[in-house]
Amino acid sequence: MATVAKTVSTAADAKLLRFALKQDAMGSGAFGVVGVVAAAIFGEMFGLPAAFLFPVGAFLVVWAAALFFLAARPTVGKAAVGVVMAINIAWVAASAELLIAGWFPLTSLGTALVIVQAVVVAGFTGLQFAGLRKTA
């Protein structure tokens, strides 16, 4: 019985949670592929060095694969979703720090990109939280 409390096993219970994880995976994967494939081009457009965009993009591709894997599991561990949400929150905080500290000479487009992607990640996290609460 304790195992049931720590996992979400029924498809109906986890529908919103799985949806949120998959949306996060698709967004992260798309952003990651663009970061890996076009780091130099987008780096100039956004005011971010390719040496920064490439490893971030590679991380996001791996992150997306992990999210898809988690969403496809027969049972979704609540602790694993908690880790996903914590990493997403850290991402949003790091995005804010990037803007506030002025780590890079961002263009206007770069500033907009950082803001928009942070808002999207926060939205994914909110959906994941709602899906997790629905399964409780």
Image: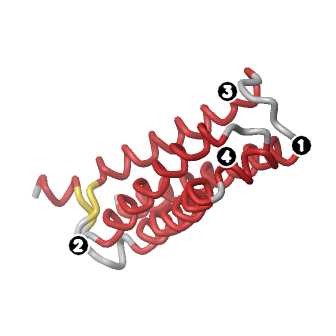
Q: Earlier in the sequence, mark 1 or mark 3?
A: 3
Of circles 2 and 4, the one toward us is 4
Instruction: Name the secondary structure under disc 3.
Output: helix
Report if the CB atoms under discs 2 and 1 are less than 8 Å apart: no
Real-space Cα separation, disc 2 to disc 1, in angstroms? 44 Å
Q: Pinpoint residue 21: horizontal percent, then vertical percent.
A: 45, 63
Real-space Cα separation, disc 2 to disc 4, in angstroms? 30 Å
Q: Which residue is mark 3?
A: 97
Q: Earlier in the sequence, mark 4 or mark 1?
A: 1
Q: Earlier in the sequence, mark 2 or mark 4?
A: 2
Please state if 50 lies on the left or on the right of 55 as rendered.
Answer: right
Q: Pinpoint residue 98: horizontal percent, then vertical percent.
A: 69, 30
Looking at the picture, which amino acid does disc 3 mark?
A: Glu
Q: Earlier in the sequence, mark 3 or mark 2?
A: 2
Please state if 97 lies on the left or on the right of 115 as rendered.
Answer: left
Where's the C terminus, which quadrant? bottom left
